[in-house]
Amino acid sequence: MELNLKMLQAEQAEATILKDLIQKLQADLQAHPESLAAESIKELLTLYREKYTCLTKTLHTAEAAFSALPSESESLLRMRYQDGLTDRLTCEQVCSRLYIAAGTQNLKHRKALQQLEAILQAMDPPCKLIKK
C-alpha cells in the first residue's frame, strides 16, 4: 500500500461521496428490484464498494500512522496534509499556529516525515510514503 500525503484531503472527500452514492444506489435497488436498471445498479454498487474499501484502508492507515507520531509531529503533518480546510495550510500558516519560525518548521517537517516513514515501514504489511 502507498500513502500519498498530498492526496489525503481528496481521498477523504471522495470516500464521503462514494459512501453517499452507495447508500443512494442501495435505496434505488431496494425500491425498484425488478427494473431494467437493476443489473447496472448492482455493477455500480460493486465498483463503488471496491473503491470505497480501498480508500478507507488508505485513510485508516494514515490515521494509525499519524496517531503513532509524537504529538508535535502529528499536529504539524495534520495541518499540512489532512485538515479538512479548503486548501492545505501554507508554511506560514502552520508556523503561526504552532508558534515556530519558518526554518524550525522546515526542520520539524522533515523530521516528522522521517518519523512517519519509519512508522509506515514498520506496519504489517509495510506501507510506502509518497512525497511527490
Image: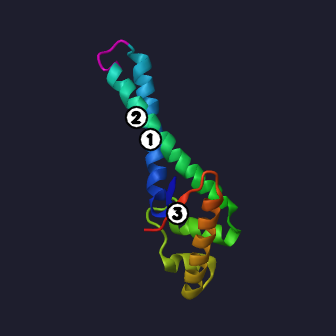
- Where does the magenta region start and end? 34-38
- Counting residues from the start of the chain, the first of labels 3 and 2 encountered is 2
Q: CA distance from mark 1 to mark 2?
A: 6 Å
Local secondary structure at mark 2: helix
Q: Specify the amino acid type for callout 2.
A: Leu
In this view, 111 is above or below 86: below
Quadrant of residue 120 in the image? bottom right
Residue 83 shows in this picture? no
Q: Main secondary structure of the magenta part?
A: loop
Give percent across and percent down for residue 1: 52, 52
Residue mark closest to the camera, 3 vs 1: 3
Give percent across and percent down for residue 38: 35, 19
Position of residue 45 in the picture relative to residue 77 (left or right): left
Q: Residue at x 44, y 18 (%)?
A: 30
Give percent across and percent down for residue 60: 59, 50
Within-10-Å neighbours for mark 1: few <14, some 14–19, many 20+: some
Q: CA distance from mark 3 to mark 2?
A: 26 Å
Q: Which residue is mark 2?
A: 47
Q: CA distance from mark 3 to mark 1?
A: 20 Å
Position of residue 92 in the picture relative to residue 48 (left or right): right
Q: Assess whether mark 2 and mark 1 are in contact (beta carbons under 8 angstroms).
A: yes
Q: Specify the amino acid type for callout 3.
A: Leu
**Magenta stretch contains residue 19:** no
Quadrant of residue 78 in the image? bottom right
* Image quarter in which the C terminus is found: bottom left
Local secondary structure at mark 3: strand
Within-10-Å neighbours for mark 2: few <14, some 14–19, many 20+: few
Name the mark on residue 51. 1
